Amino acid sequence: MRTRTRKLLFSTAFAAGVLVASAPEALAADWVIKQPSAHPTYRAELEPHGNLILYRYRNYGRASRRYFGDAEGGAGFRASIELADPAFIKKINNTIAISFGLDLTNCRYCRHDEFSIWSPVAMQWNFFLTRKWSVFGEVGAIVRSDGFYRDLWLDPALWVGGRYHFNDKIALTMRAGVPWLSIGVSFFVGS
């Protein structure tokens, strides 16, 4: 990712975080970040979502080029299995999960079919800020194919996201990063 694009992405994420944190509800919120395990109890998170891809790699023969624009849309499903609670920092409210899924998007530039299949696998680090809000970061890789796994490419995956929890079992989930933006509904199962 170019330095200019990276700076824009990080400054936008920072500005959105400041805006959310300065909202009247956030100032009066019941902060639980310093209370380990003060979040909904779950073993897995199941998330159907919609995707919008604004930036991606395109492969032409042996050359791989990066392009911005030519939006693609699609849908997918993600499952995240909790591995540690609390995770790396024992004094705050955080968990680690492994996240994997399957996504389909339209593709105008594919060689074989008019769609792409994406199979992401990532480590997800969750931070529960209040009873209603949690944020997360994900890093991993995606196996991408044009059509039904005819040509395969390995792409990087890097996302930041947030959840608005309606209750202990359902949340609205938003995710932004490389390669796509997504919005979906998370269902927390198991206890």
Image: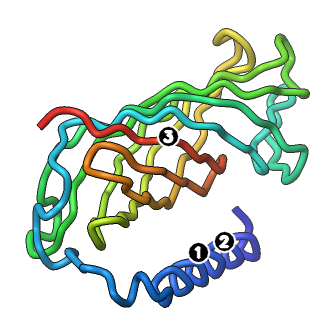
Q: Position of residue 106 (x, y in %)?
A: 80, 26
Rendered residue at 49%/59% (across/down): 161
Is 77 drawn above or below residue 7 in the view shown?
Answer: above
Quadrant in the picture for the C terminus: top left
Q: Is residue 29 left or right of residue 47?
A: left
| Tag in front: 1 or 2 | 1
Q: Which mark is residue 24?
A: none
| Tag in front: 3 or 2 | 2
- Identify the coloring: rainbow
Q: Hey, what amino acid is under mark 3?
A: Ala
* Residue contact between numbered discs 1 and 2, judged by CB atoms under 8 Å: yes
Q: Hey, what amino acid is under mark 1?
A: Ala
Is 155 drawn above or below residue 92 in the view shown?
Answer: above
Q: Position of residue 176 (x, y in %)?
A: 60, 57
Q: Nearer the viewer, residue 131 or 106?
A: 131
* Residue contact between numbered discs 3 and 2, judged by CB atoms under 8 Å: no
Q: Which mark is residue 13?
A: 1
Q: Is residue 135 left or right of residue 16?
A: left
Residue annotated with mark 3: 141
Q: Is residue 112 left or right of residue 166?
A: right
Classify residue 11 by image quadrant: bottom right
Rendered residue at 45%/45% (across/down): 140
Residue annotated with mark 2: 9
